[in-house]
Image (tube, rainbow, N blue to C red):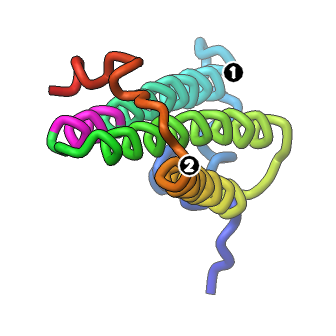
Amino acid sequence: MKQLTNTEPVEKILFGNKTTHQSIRIARAGGVPATANIDKHADRLKNLGTMSKHGGIVLVGVGLTAACMQIANTPDTKEKNEIFVETITSTVVGAGLGTVVGLFLVSNPIGWGAAIVLAVGSTAASYATGKIVRSAYNEYGEIDFVTSTGTGRICK
């Protein structure tokens, strides 16, 4: 049975049936620069990185839109503020942890399995932090963030 490597799932997505070494090997054809294959795949990886960055921004936008819809459909001011506090906290914590995980991944050659664990862990941490802050606001909060920030006027 073939043993999986850390990069095999990504190799399948990026290179199809070829391994990384087969895909980026030095071009030996005449008239083709020796680094043509490397340059082609480096550009492809750069484009994937750019798309994934924008994907994160889209997901944040979807999350904030969903929270805005919840705020608009909730009649209770206290609950509107709980939704607001939870959403802002989890978004800020998620963005911060995402940045830290991204910097860690750039600086350390770890396997894809560890990268996925870090990503899932940071997502769970941002979700849990949002719930904890919402609970704390429910217990002690008195400030009307929805009205003072204008979110109530935007989310109608």
Magenta stretch: includes residue 91: no
Q: Is residue 139 visible?
A: yes
Question: Element type at marker 2?
Answer: helix
Left or right: 98 in relation to 89 = right
The C terminus lies in quadrant: top left
Which residue carries the number 1 mark?
Answer: 35
Judged from this view, the residue extending furthest toward the bottom is: 1
Q: Name the residue at 65% across, 15% down.
A: 33
Residue 36 x %, y %: 61, 20
- Quadrant assignment, res 102: top right
Q: Name the residue at 70% across, 21% down.
A: 34
Which one is nearer the viewer's eye here, 85 or 109?
Answer: 85
Residue 35 x %, y %: 69, 21
Which-is-in-front pick, marks 2 and 1?
2
Distance (Cα) linking label 2 and label 1 = 62 Å
Q: Name the residue at 26% across, 25% down.
A: 152
Which one is nearer the viewer's eye here, 36 or 62?
Answer: 62
Question: Element type at marker 1?
Answer: loop
Residue type, numbered disc 2: Tyr
- Quadrant assignment, res 81: top left
Which residue carries the number 2 mark?
Answer: 140
Q: Are marks 2 and 1 in contact (CB under 8 Å)?
A: no
| Image: 57 above or below 7 | above
The N terminus lies in quadrant: bottom right
Magenta stretch: includes residue 66: yes
Predominant secondary structure, magenta span: helix
Q: Earlier in the sequence, mark 2 or mark 1?
A: 1
Q: Which residues are magenta?
A: 64-72
Q: Name the residue at 64% across, 47% down.
A: 20
